[in-house]
Amino acid sequence: MDSVAKLVDSISGTLASAANGDEQSIILLAVIYVLLVCSYSVIWQMRVNAWPSVTGRLEKLGLRKFGATEYVRANQDYVSDALYTYQVNGQEYKGKRVSPWVMVASYNLRGLLRLQNKGVGVHSANEVTVYYNPAKPEKSFLVKTGPFSQIFTALIGIGPLLFYLARYSG
């Protein structure tokens, strides 16, 4: 129990130091946060990649404005806009999510969304491959993440940790 008390004392000391503006403590907490978020994201991506697929019918695939309409085009944000139907065990579902990656892009970067939409496996007669959660079939995507996405996410999480270690160890 002594080690648990030391851990609690260390955590409370780090939080107190961060509250007092200690740079190292603030950066440490930010590193831990980024590492946790990215770890969760990698695990989520791996789980989604294990989802089964069915063939569905694509009703719509494009881009739509996100947020309020901007008068300056460069300030306008966009998201993928999809609608598709699919069946699992005789039950019909409607989906609208393209990818596990939630992407919002500016007018100038909306080409990234178009590129993501090109990854949708459209077959003949508007048929698409739909990946669905077997535990909750109403949750679905048209695009899986690949190993590159998982490695990229892991590197985003590890980068701040390496920065912290390089700066404060030694």
Image: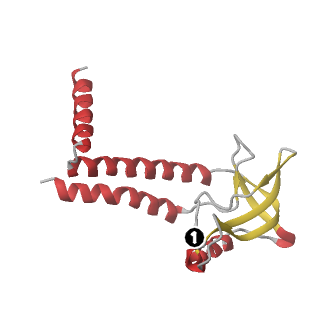
Task: Name the quarter where the N terminus is drawn.
Answer: top left
The percent position of residue 81, horizontal first and vertical second, equals 72, 65
The percent position of residue 23, horizontal first and vertical second, equals 21, 52
At x 66% / y 50%, what residue is drawn?
51
Residue type at numbered disc 1: Ala
Image quadrant in which you'd find residue 64? bottom right
* Other residues around mark 1 within 10 Å, as few (<14) / some (14–19) / many (≥20): some
Question: Please, is residue 118 above or below residue 32 in the view?
Answer: below
The answer to which of 169 and 52 lies nearer the viewer is: 169
In the drawing, does residue 47 fall left or right of residue 22?
Answer: right
At x 51% / y 48%, what residue is drawn?
43
In the image, farthest residue toward the top: 1
In the drawing, does residue 110 fall left or right of residue 14?
Answer: right
In the drawing, does residue 93 fall left or right of residue 148?
Answer: right
Task: Name the quarter where the C terminus is drawn.
Answer: bottom left
The scheme the figure's colours follow is secondary structure
The answer to which of 69 and 4 lies nearer the viewer is: 69
The answer to which of 161 and 68 lies nearer the viewer is: 68
Question: Please, is residue 70 above or below residue 7 in the view?
Answer: below
Image quadrant in which you'd find residue 73? bottom right
SS state under label 1: strand
At x 16% / y 53%, what residue is drawn?
169
In the image, farthest residue toward the left: 170
The percent position of residue 58, horizontal first and vertical second, equals 81, 65
Q: Which residue in the structure is indicated by mark 1?
A: 105
The answer to which of 74 and 149 lies nearer the viewer is: 74
Question: Please, is residue 135 above or below residue 7 in the view?
Answer: below
